[in-house]
Amino acid sequence: MSYHSRADLGGRPLESPVTPEPEGDPFHGRWEERTHAITLAMGATGLWNIDMTRAARETLPDYDDLSYYAKWLAGLEKLLRQLELVGADELAAGRALRPGPRLPRVLAAADVAAVLARGAPTERPPAAPARFAVGQAVRTRAEPVPHHTRLPDYARGRRGRIERVLGAHVFADAHAHGQGEQPQWLYTVVLAEDELWGARAERQGLSVAIDAWEPYLEPA
Amino acid sequence: MSGHDHDHDHDGRSELGEMDVRVRALESILAAKGYVDPAALDILIDTYQTKVGPRNGARVVARAWVNPDFRAWLLADATGAIASLGYRGRQGEHMVAVENTEARHNVVVCTLCSCYPWPVLGLPPVWYKSAPYRARVVRDPRGVLADFGVTLPASTEIRVWDSTAEVRYLVVPRRPAGTEGLDEDALAALVTRDSMIGTGLARAPGDRA
C-alpha cells in the first residue's frame, strides 16, 4: 500500500467540539491570503489539476499537524519540486537561484475575473449510457484502493440508493495521477443511518448523501 | 489523530511569523521565474475578501423566498438560477440547492478536504475545514448542531451532503415567521452563512446579527 490519504476524516472518533466563527475576513493573516492566491495562480498555469493538488495535500506526512493553509503551502511546494519548477535549494535559500522554464500560461491580473468566472467545469459528454437509474439499489466498493479516491472510508461497502444522476464527470481517481480525464457517470447515492453506523441506541434520523462515480458502485 | 483534534486551526504567533517568511520567499521565487504575477495575486485576494462571500448566497435565498418561479428554477437547476444573479465559476461550476423544510434539515460537509460553494458563500470558515466537523457531522449531526446552539425536533430528518465530487451544495434555509412584509434586501440580511451550510437557521426579524 504505497498511497495513504490522511484527509479522509468522515466518521473518525473525534469528539472535540466544533467552534463557530463569525462571518468576516476568511483569512487569518497575510500569509494565508498569499498562500491561497499563489495556489490559485499556479493552478491557472495548467501544469497540474485540482485532483493532483488534493492528492499532494492528503499525502503530506504531517497532514494532521498542519493548519489548513499550511497544508496548501506544503502541497504547492511539493508539486513545484516534483515538476522541478522550484528546487529544494531555492526553497531553502528563499530566493530563485536559476531561471525557470517558460510556462505555457501565466495568470495575468487582467484575466483574473474571467478565469474565476469560467471556473473548471468537470461535466463531459458521456461515452456510454448510465448504468444506474434513480431509485436503484447499489453497493459501494468495499476494498480500499492504493491511489487517490473520492469514496470516503466510512462509505465503503455500503448499500445505498441512487437519488440523482449528475452526468458524466472527470474521474478524480484517474485525473489525480496524470491518467487523463476518463469521464465516468456520477451519481448522488444516499446511505441510511443504520447502514453506516449500525443500529444505534440513539438514532438521529440521519441519512448521508455522497457523490459517487460509477466505478465505485455495483448493483445491490 | 486524537492528540490533534484541534487541528491547530488558529495558528500560533510563532508559526505566523515563520509562515509569513516562507510564503514571502515562495512568492518571490515564483515571481522571479515569471510563474506568477503579484498584481494578479492582489486581485485574487481582494476578490475573496470583498467581492465573493456569503452575502451572494443570501441574495439567492431571499430571491427564492419571495419568487416561486425562481425557487422552482433554483431547485431544478441551481447552476443556472444562481448564474442569473451573476454568481458563477470557480468551485460553483455544478451547483445543487437543497431546501430545508419542517420534515427535513440539510447540512453540507466535505469529509475529504474542504469543498465549498465559493461563488455563493466565499471561502469556508475555519470550522468547516476542521477535523472535528468533518469527522463528526456524518455520524453525529445533532451533536454538531448543538455546538452551534441549534436543536431540531426529533421528527425532523437530517440529510448530510458530503461533497465528494465537483458538485457543490447550497442549503436554502426555512423562511422565518413574521417576515411576510419584508422585501428581498431585508430578507437577505436574515440569511446567515451558517444557515446556508446547514449548521444554523435564518435569523428572525429583530434577532441580533
Image (cartoon, coloured by chain):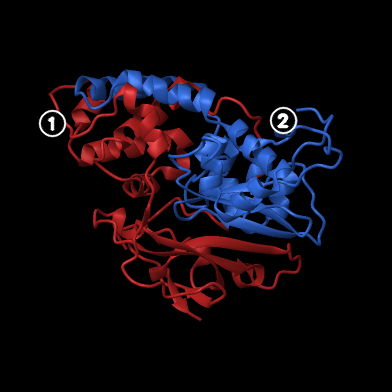
When asked about the image quadrant of residue A78, the answer is top left
Given contact means CB atoms under 8 Å apart, are the residues at marks 1 and 2 in contact?
no
Please, is residue A94 above or below residue A152 in the view?
A: above
Q: Is residue B126 or residue A217 the one in the foreground? A: A217
Amino acid on which disc 2 is placed: Ala
Residue shown at 14% from the left, 28% from the top: A100
Amino acid on which disc 1 is placed: Pro
Chain assigned red? A
- Write down the residue under mark 1: A101
Instruction: Kindly identify which numbered label has been placed on residue B189.
Output: 2
Q: What subunit carries mark 1?
A: A
Q: Position of residue A214 (x, y in %)?
A: 41, 69
Q: Position of residue B76 (x, y in %)?
A: 58, 55
- In the rendered picture, chain B carries what hue? blue
Residue shown at 48% from the left, 43% from the top: B92
Q: Position of residue A24 (x, y in %)?
A: 61, 26
Q: Is residue A40 or residue B99 the one in the foreground? A: B99
